[in-house]
Image (cartoon, grey):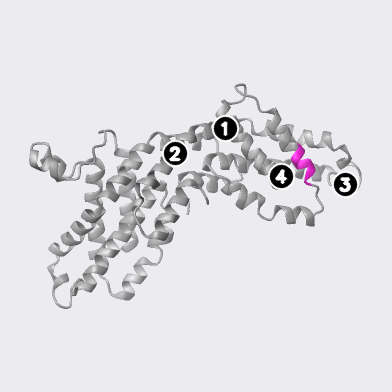
């Protein structure tokens, strides 16, 4: 799992040396930003269900055709799975906020997602609409501090980029 | 390889749950204690040669048969291998302490170590004893309770000579307990 600490340790191990002063310095640098990330992760997990519901609602209201017969959301089971997938992405964003890198999203969310959606004939534009709604909806300081919101929004943008 | 943060992500993913307030509280503790941890890693890395050579010398003092003909440290070649292994083990312990997680130590050092030593005919009890001495001296360096520090308090000459860490004295109990647990992990993997 890629994070600042594991990157530093992997590099030191490849060279067969002890962690150097510059290694310790880069760990210290990532620690300094960590409190904002952890705040965002905590707030996201506290309001998780509401965030997922709102994002899911946004995608079906922007693309109502999805619920027509023969489309990707033509029965309740498929609609539920859409909300579930948005929940998965949000959960991975929560992990990324804690880890301090995009490792969890890359390894468990994005790798292979394009192929899966193409095989199952699922459009990705509705997901983009859902995450764009989540990104626009966040408000500081109502939801979290500005720095925390910036970290959260950048990960939402990362997901949107991967689905575009 | 994992660190304290990605460990939280992996165990939450196994339950398909978000990382909630409980886990985050313990990670905040890691952050609050981060400077202590970095100082502890620095205390080990800056004194690595001293820690390793003292441990190997101590191991031999307790069992001088090791450097007599037929002992496992007898020709310089094997003594050098012993010092090298001590340093490698200490290095992985330093990585684990930096990451706050034992996975790097387990995956890259301890996995198969005992089997390798058995195959090479290295006495496991001696190796474990060397690690135990490394544990004692590393913890002394982390807490600055090593003999040099104590002597230097009253001896001007020594104050100038020895490698003083010059860190602010604080509560290192959590970090030193964690470091001790990594040494114990090595010892139990060897026995």
**Residue picked out by circle 4:** A85
Q: Nearer the viewer, mark 3 or mark 1?
A: 1
Q: Subunit of mark 3?
A: A
Q: What is the C-alpha distance between the residues marked 2 and 3?
A: 48 Å
Whether residue B45 appears in magenta in the rendering, the answer is no
**Residue picked out by circle 1:** A40
**Same-subunit check for callouts 3 and 1:** yes
Ranked by sequence position, the earlier of labels 3 and 4 is 3
| Residue for point 66% across, 38% down | A156
Q: Subunit of mark 1?
A: A
Question: Where residue B48 sits in the image (x, y, percent)?
Answer: 26, 53
**Same-subunit check for callouts 3 and 4:** yes
Q: Subunit of mark 2?
A: A
| Residue for point 34% across, 67% down | B114
Magenta stretch, residue numbers: A124-129
Asked if residue B187 is positioned above or below residue B174 in the image, the reply reads: below
Would you say A82 lies left or right of B143 here? right
How many numbered marks does the figure carry?
Answer: 4
**Residue picked out by circle 2:** A29
Return the residue found at the far bottom: B70
Question: Where residue A26 sits in the image (x, y, percent)?
Answer: 43, 43
Would you say A32 lies left or right of B11 here? left
Q: Subunit of mark 4?
A: A
| Residue for point 51% across, 44% down | B8
Quarter location, residue A81: top right
Judged by its main secondary structure, the magenta piece is helix
Q: Nearer the viewer, mark 4 or mark 2?
A: 2
**Residue picked out by circle 3:** A71
Q: What is the C-alpha distance between the residues marked 4 and 1?
A: 20 Å
* Label 1: which secondary element: helix
């Amino acid at each position: 799992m890629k994070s600042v600490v594991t990157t530093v340790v992997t590099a030191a191990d490849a060279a067969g040396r002890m962690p150097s002063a510059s290694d310790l310095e880069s760990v210290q640098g990532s620690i300094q930003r960590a409190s904002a990330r952890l705040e965002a992760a905590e707030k996201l997990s506290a309001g998780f269900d509401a965030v997922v519901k709102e994002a899911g609602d946004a995608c079906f209201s922007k693309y109502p055709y999805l619920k027509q017969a023969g489309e990707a959301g033509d029965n309740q089971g498929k609609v539920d799975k859409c909300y579930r997938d948005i929940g998965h992405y949000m959960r991975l964003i929560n992990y990324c906020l804690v880890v301090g890198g995009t490792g969890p999203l890359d390894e468990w969310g994005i790798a292979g997602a394009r192929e899966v959606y193409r095989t199952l004939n699922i459009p990705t534009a509705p997901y983009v609409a859902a995450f764009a709604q989540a990104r626009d909806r966040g408000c500081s300081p109502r939801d979290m501090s500005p720095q925390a919101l910036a970290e959260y929004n950048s990960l939402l943008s990362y997901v949107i980029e991967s689905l575009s | 390889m994992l660190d304290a943060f990605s460990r939280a992500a992996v165990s939450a993913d196994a339950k398909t749950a978000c990382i909630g307030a409980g886990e985050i509280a313990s990670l905040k503790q890691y952050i609050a204690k981060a400077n202590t941890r970095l100082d502890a890693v620095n205390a080990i890395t800056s004194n690595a040669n001293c820690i390793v050579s003292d441990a190997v010398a101590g191991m031999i003092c307790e069992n001088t048969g090791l450097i007599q003909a037929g002992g496992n440290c007898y020709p310089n070649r094997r003594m050098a291998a012993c010092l090298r292994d001590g340093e490698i083990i200490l290095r992985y312990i330093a990585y684990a302490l930096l990451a706050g997680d034992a996975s790097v130590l387990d995956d890259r050092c301890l996995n198969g170590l005992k089997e390798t030593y058995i195959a090479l005919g290295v006495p496991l009890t001696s190796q474990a004893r060397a690690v135990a001495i490394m544990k004692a001296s590393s913890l002394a360096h982390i807490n600055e309770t090593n003999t040099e520090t104590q002597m230097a308090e009253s001896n001007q000459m020594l104050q100038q000579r020895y490698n003083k860490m010059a860190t602010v004295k604080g509560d290192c109990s959590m970090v030193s307990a964690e470091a001790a647990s990594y040494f114990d992990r090595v010892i139990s993997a060897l026995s």
